[in-house]
Image (cartoon, helix red, strand yellow):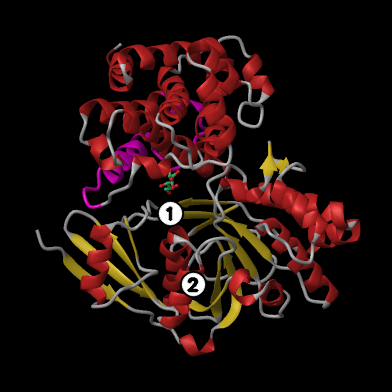
Amino acid sequence: MEETVLRESPQFDVGVLKPRILHIGFGGFARAHQMIYLQEGMNKVGGDWGVIACRLNSGVEELTALDEAGNTYTVAEIDADTVTAREIGVVIGTCHPKRDGMDTLLGIIAAEPMAVISLTITEKGYCSRNGHLDPDNKGIIADLKTPENPTTAIGVIVEGLRLRREAGLPGLTVLSCDNQPDNGKLVRAVVLGLAHKRDTGLADWIDANVSFPSTMVDRVVPALDDYGRDLLMKINGREDENGIVCEPFRQWVIEDDFATDRPPFAEGGATLTDDVRPFEMMKLRMLNGAHTFLAMLGSLSGLETVAACMADPVFRKAARKIMLDEQRPTLPPIEGVDLEAYADELITRFANPKLKHRTAQIAWDTSQKLPQRLLHGIAWHLQSNTPWPLLALAVAGWIRFVKVTADEGGKLTDPLSDDLIAKAKNYDGDALVDVILNNDAVFEEDLRREPGFRSTIVEAYRAIAKKGPRAAVEAVING
Ligand code: CS2
């Protein structure tokens, strides 16, 4: 069926925009989430909130293409029969230290108009271990050696803030938009942790002048596929290297704690609140937990997308069951939120037939995702003595996923890939489960010591190895 295409363009004065927001990690998610809120907010109330789009590692070409396209790109929101295409106009420039030099990037942070550094740098970008700065992180070690030429986002923020302080400028807001519990507290802990190692005076200044609101972000934004590229070509009549296709749904809950004036995110549809934590826990455990479950067991079963999983009655039922039977009980209530309706909405979103959200993509960096998505819920069940068979299959499914990848001679897209693959080459069965569970960067000691933790994962791993992943899931949902 032909989709109906609705088009929108910016309705504010782009001429007055100043470099007031630096977004580090300007990938598909940022383009389709934070930028939309800002644009919608500015459409309503105007303002001078221009964005500098920044990346630190890959992505030079995309940023250069964005410059060449006059800093505009298209976000196409799609469902079964409608496409809403928005031309985004909030970006006023781009910066990549490998192209422009680190001094240029630091100069942007240390210039008077800058007010918000927002981040989508993925879990590993925080260089943390169990909520604190990881002193053994290679990037952090490098950034302590040459702090004026940092390599990590955390190092860039600390050095940029040092220069702001030196220039006598006010502090700003660091806004984490990654899927972690208490992401504001986490980024605060690592920024202050690194600053302390450099200069306690700087750490004190940051503590007093910089705010770190926590946020919950939500929108499914798969990597662009051929369907998406063709759709954008149809809409624009030209290639749009920064164009992106996503679902119509979006949600953003932000802790109301800005160091200076606040960009019009709330006017653009975000919810401001004093306590993001219950929203973050709900989303991480019900949405992302189910995603990781499907990424592992779905891809082991040959299902390539989340929508394909939803078309399989076993996985559809299992996804709803992990959300409602195993994650919901672990969550604090939120006034006005019905978790059953939330789960049903998630299943509908997952089933969006136009989105090719690949299970293999969600499987990236799973070692960094397990605690907040699965293990925190498991810890709750172990305390309450309640069953968690699907959470166990998800964790065991990850171990199986590592094993299958190693046996095929492959690698994982994961910072722990080398270690995990080496273990999977040398061990199998219960012994493999044991060596993997032994990694205390992923599995905290308290959890490992809980009676019933190891044995439940071992049992789930045996079920997957013996019956196959889909039959193991089926046995649980029919059991
Ligand atoms: C996904 C998320 O790739 C993943 O790990 O679970 O990117 C997910 O699509 C978003 O968090 C949805 O808001």
Where residue 439 sits, quadrant-wise, is top right
x then y, percent, for residue 236? 26, 76
Where residue 182 sits, quadrant-wise, is top right
x then y, percent, for residue 268? 44, 67
Q: Which mark is residue 44?
A: none
Left or right: residue 303 versus residue 147 is: left
Q: Is residue 182 visible?
A: yes
Up the image or down, 280 lies above or below 315; here it is: below
Q: Is residue 268 visible?
A: no
Dot in front, 2 or 1: 2
Pointer 2 residue? 63
Q: Residue furthest front?
A: 409
x then y, percent, for residue 42? 46, 76
Residue depicted at 62% across the width and 76% down the height: 100
Q: Earlier in the sequence, mark 2 or mark 1?
A: 2
Residue 350 in magenta stretch: yes
Pointer 1 residue? 251
Left or right: residue 316 versus residue 432 is: left
Q: Residue furthest bottom?
A: 15
Q: Quadrant of the N terminus?
A: bottom left
Mark 2: amino acid: Leu
Left or right: residue 110 versus residue 471 is: right
Q: Is mark 1 within 8 Å of ligand 1?
A: yes
Task: Give the structural element (helix, strand or loop) at label 1.
Answer: strand
Mark 1: amino acid: Gln
x then y, percent, for residue 67? 47, 80
Circle 1: is it few (<14), some (14-19), or many (20+) Cα within 10 Å? some
Give the Cα distance between marks 2 and 1.
Answer: 26 Å
Residue 203 in magenta stretch: no
The span shown in magenta is: 326-354
